[in-house]
Image (cartoon, grey):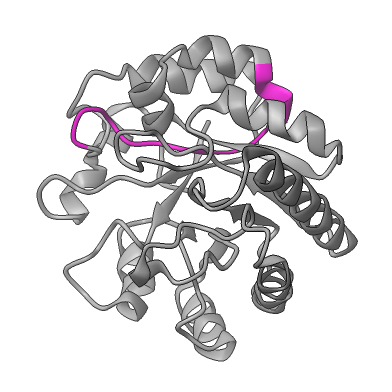
Amino acid sequence: MPHFAANLTMSFQEIPFMQRFAAASQAGFDSVEFMFPYDYTKAELRQALDANNLKIVLFNLPAGNWAQGDRGVAIHPERKQEFRDGVEKALSYAEPLGVKQLNCLVGKKLTEFSDAEQRATLIENLRYAAEKLAEKGIRLLVEPLNSFDMPGFYHSTAEQVLTLLDEVGHANAYLQYDLYHEQRGVGELTATIRKQFARIAHIQIADNPGRHQPGTGELNYRFLFSEIDRLGYTGYVGLEYIPEGPTADSFSWVEEYGYTRK
């Protein structure tokens, strides 16, 4: 049975971020994920978790200046130290918060550097991150973002990420598989899950089109969930969708599909 994690970046946007922990607990979840923790102190995040009996299952490494358009710095040849500092910063949050997986958004392609320079930088940085995280018992994840929602992102498909991870060659580097992004890009969701199951450390979902909850679009999530159950998936499924209608109502599909929110 999938273990669902409410995504506090996408869900409960009608209330301030720090209030979303209580809202997720009240909605019946025991696990959450979100994009970034760095605007908040570790102490206040720890207090929010403890007060609401929640666990954080995932957040991202620092991704540069998000407001100015950065979507990661791992490919930037002149920002290697910034990337390494970001790894240390992420670990300084992950350890006290009990987070066992960190996702890397690698960034957009750069016009001022060659493809070879960017690839070499990315491989070097991911090896560094995978090793540093492994020392702390934390898995490194790498996620593709589809080229419609994120034009210019370095890799837009799971196949591209897995080829990259083959070049990285570290046992502590895994695929974060977002079914919404992959459906928009190439489809073949079930075939990829079956073929690459051992390399998938975390799954995220949203329906397509619209990036709303299951049941609002074309994806057959009843079938997909039964497939990951059949394969023995024991990780989390992050609900990284934009709720259509009130957030609390957007979770009703969980029970309709025969699952629980924990």
Residue 246, quarter of the rendered image: bottom left
Residue 187 place in picture, x, y as percent: 41, 15
Most distant residue in the left direction? 245
In this picture, residue 46 sits left or right of residue 134: left
* Image vertical order of residue 87 relative to residue 60, above or below: below
Q: Say if residue 105 shows up in the picture.
A: no
Q: Tell me, yes or no, whether the highlighted magenta stretch contains residue 197.
A: yes
Magenta stretch? 196-210
Residue 213: quarter of image: top left
Identify the residue shown where x is 37% and y is 62%: 69
Q: Is residue 235 above or below residue 5?
A: above
Look at the picture and state if 134 lies above or below 184: below
* Direction from residue 114 to residue 258 in the image, left or right: left
The residue drawn where x is 51% and y is 67% is 54
Res 93 quadrant in image? bottom right
147 displayed left or right of 3: left
